[in-house]
Structures are given as C-alpha cells and as structure tokens.
Image: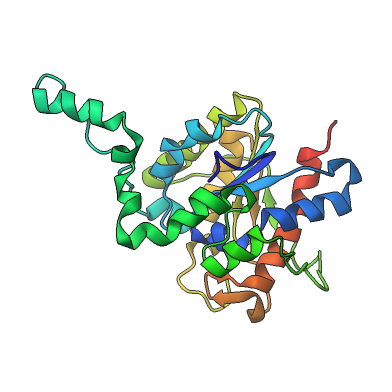
Amino acid sequence: MFDRHPRVDFLFLGTSRTQDGVSPVLVSQGLESLSPELRGVRGYNAGFTSASLDALESLSGRFLSRPELRLIVIELSDPQTVNPPTPWDGSKPDETTVEGRLAVLARGVRFIRHRSAFLSDNSARLPALLVFAPALGGWEVKGVDQVATWLGRREPVAAGFDAAAWKPVIFRPGGDATRLDAEPSAIADRFVAVAAKYRARGVTVVFASPPLARDWSPAPERDSLKGMFAEVARRSGCEVWDFSSLALPERFFRNPSHLGDEGRAHFSRALAVEMVPHLTPK
C-alpha cells in the first residue's frame, strides 16, 4: 500500500497506537493552515498492529525507496520495544539441494511468494491493496473507512483544538547523559541505528510517544521509559515528542491505549504543529 501511494513527504511508523491515532490527510491540512508554503505536502501512516523494533529495523530499506521522503515520525513506546519479532522473510532455502533450488525459483513467482494473501482469512484485505491503496492514508483498518476514503469522504477536523493541552514534552539532542541499565541502553542504541539509516539519506527523523488515557496502567512511557527517551534524543541527535503524559479528555480514546476518531483528529493536528519547523524550507 505504501508503494502504491502517489506521494509521501512524511511517514509515520509504529504500532496500532500510531495506526489508529494519526490521519495523514488531517496532518496535511494542519500543515497547510499553519504554513501555506507546505501546501501539497502529503504523507502516509505505515503503523500496524504488533509492530516491533525488529520490524522497524527490517523494513527500513523499503521506506527509503521514496526520493521525496523528507520526515519520518517513529513511535517510541513500550509495545514497540517489547513486541516479539515478526518473521518477514522466513528461513533461507538450502540451495545445495534440488528442493532448495526449486524453492528459490518459486519465490520469484509473485503469486507463490504472496500466496497467503489469498487465504480466506486475508481475502477482506485484498480490495484495500488492489483497489483502494493509492487513496488510503494507512489508518483505515475497517472496510467502511477504506471505502469512504476511496470515495473522497473528508474526515472531521479537530474542532476546538487546544494547542496548549496538546503540547508534548520534548526531549532534545544535546542534553546530559542519562544512566540506563544494559537492556534499555541496548534498545536505545537500536532506535538510534534505525534513525541513522534515514538521516544518512537526508531524511529528518523524530520520535513520538503517543497519548494514553489517564487511567491506563501500567504505563512505562510515563515513568520508567523517560530516561530512554532522553538517551534516544541525545544519542540520535533527533527530537523525542512525548505525548504520553498529557491529561486528555476520555472522549478522545476508544480504549485506554488507543485514540478514537475525535482523538485522531486532535492528535493529527498536534503533530502538524510540531512538524512545521521540520518541513518548512530553510
């Protein structure tokens, strides 16, 4: 779907918290209203359920294929760090055997390589991939939302947006070192390495921790992960936008860790506010 999207100036990567919580169309509208010179800037939401740090590392090359890509916002959250790895490519066939060589040849046939897409459980996803993909922003999980977007339905904007209530805590590069235990330090280094791949190609990278409902518990993003946020910013040279500790109305959430329709509109606007300086030509 990302490959079929006509233009991607900015990209969101993360778990279902990002997928549910960000509308690239509303972000684009917010950017244009805040800075008219950003008119026409477009993005895509590549967040998906159970995304992990391993997936983030594995897929980085795919997202570098777009020459117009200027900014990537990467989710920094507890699920992103603890979700188990996803086997993207499977085991490599043993090419010393006839069976192994045949397997390699078979993988060159797209129908065979992607045969799982034609299982009955996956058939509902095919229209989004084959028909709707160029029109979708990536957040549309339900078929009704996919069809509505394809037909040109305009999403409701963030009515009564309160910029002060949506101002994140920003961890900036250049801060003092924070002592981390071995495991979180290693995780921080992996995020830093992912950011370095994109920055080496001239793409600006920022990290963001999505909002959480006030009664969500446990919420490491609100306490134990703060040191890692600071270290990711210091080691990577990238800002970390922490929205996780904001005290937001319950109506913005469809469950304690995921935003609903209204929350998505407001979070998208809040992201646009922070993205303007990173996208405005200097």
Of residue 44 and residue 183, the one placed in the foreground of this image is 44
Of residue 51 and residue 42, the one placed in the foreground of this image is 42
Q: Is residue 191 visible?
A: yes
Q: Is residue 244 visible?
A: no
Q: How many marks?
A: 0
Q: Is residue 141 above or below residue 234?
A: below
Query: Quadrant of the image for the C terminus?
Result: top right
In the rendered view, does 43 fall on the left or right side of 65?
right
In the rendered view, does 73 fall on the left or right side of 82?
right
Report which quarter residue 72 is drawn in: top right
In the rendered view, does 27 fall on the left or right side of 97?
right
**Residue drawn at point x = 49 percent, y = 67 percent:** 219
Q: Report the colour scheme.
A: rainbow
Place of residue 121 in the rendered image (x, y in percent of width and height, measured from the top left):
33, 62
**Residue drawn at point x = 69 percent, y = 56 percent:** 169
**Residue drawn at point x = 30 percent, y = 49 percent:** 116
Q: Is residue 203 above or below residue 101?
A: below
Q: Which residue reaches farthest top?
A: 96
Report which quarter residue 22 is drawn in: bottom right
Q: Is residue 253 above or below residue 169?
A: below
Place of residue 237 in the rendered image (x, y in percent of width and height, measured from the top left):
63, 34
**Residue drawn at point x = 71 percent, y = 60 percent:** 152
Place of residue 159 in the rendered image (x, y in percent of width and height, measured from the top left):
81, 72
Q: Which residue reaches farthest right?
A: 36
Of residue 276 and residue 223, the one placed in the foreground of this image is 276
Of residue 175 and residue 116, the one placed in the foreground of this image is 116
